[in-house]
């Protein structure tokens, strides 16, 4: 990973639909070496995919809920079952295993509280949970999909 790769990644994180010629121009390479670098970044798994970032409000899922989950179960089999259950809930955007007092944290998007209640009922159907706490976001102050590249080596 060198400065050219970082510049390419910066361009792609800002707009993955940029034409190759424009990316090459911005980073100071000709198109062929730039294309090869992008191919290598994809092959190495640094670029995992290219997606469109959608507006949740315009798609009627503008309510964000952070859900803290505590469980009585800590076996690998239970985790695999719970993870598969959570994965089947399309409103769950992110799902993390945590350290500390909370075992799992989820980020859920829904249109309203009633829709969240339905998600909640599907979530607790798995069993083995000792506490599920929901925190509703009031305002999105910062949102980005761009990772910091200064640490990349």
Image (cartoon, helix red, strand yellow):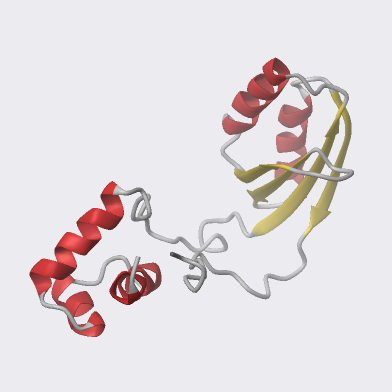
The single residue placed furthest to the top in the displayed view is: 77
Q: How many marks?
A: 0
Work out which quarter of the rendered image holds the N terminus and state it. Answer: bottom left
Give the x, y percent position of residue 126. 74, 21
- Residue at coordinates 13% horizontally, 68% vertically from top-left? 33
Q: Is residue 142 left or right of residue 153?
A: right
Q: Nearer the viewer, residue 147 or 68?
A: 147
- Residue at coordinates 88% horizontally, 24% vertically from top-left? 72
Give the x, y percent position of residue 123. 73, 30
Q: Is residue 51 left or right of residue 140?
A: left
Residue 78 lies in quadrant: top right
- Residue at coordinates 74% horizontally, 52% vertically from top-left? 65
Q: Nearer the viewer, residue 122 or 96?
A: 96
Q: Nearer the viewer, residue 34 or 143?
A: 34
- Residue at coordinates 46% horizontally, 65% vertically from top-left? 152
Work out which quarter of the rendered image holds the C terminus and state it. Answer: bottom left
Q: Is residue 87 above or below residue 36?
A: above
Q: Is residue 151 left or right of residue 2?
A: right
Q: Is residue 36 above or below residue 14?
A: above
Give the x, y percent position of residue 43. 27, 48
Q: Is residue 25 above or below residue 61?
A: below
């Amino acid at each position: 990973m060198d400065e050219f790769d970082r510049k390419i990644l910066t361009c792609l994180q800002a707009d993955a639909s940029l034409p190759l010629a424009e990316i090459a121009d911005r980073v100071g390479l000709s198109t062929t070496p730039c294309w090869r670098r992008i191919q290598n970044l994809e092959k190495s798994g640094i670029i995992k995919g290219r997606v469109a970032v959608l507006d949740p409000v315009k798609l009627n899922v503008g309510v964000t809920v952070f859900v803290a989950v505590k469980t009585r179960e800590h076996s690998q089999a239970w985790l695999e079952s719970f993870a598969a259950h959570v994965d089947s809930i399309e409103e769950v955007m992110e799902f993390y295993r945590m350290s500390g007092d909370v075992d799992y944290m989820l980020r859920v998007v829904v249109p309203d509280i009633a829709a969240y209640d339905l998600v909640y009922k599907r979530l607790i159907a798995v069993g083995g949970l000792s506490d599920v706490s929901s925190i509703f976001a009031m305002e999105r102050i910062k949102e980005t999909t761009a990772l910091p590249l200064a640490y990349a080596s």
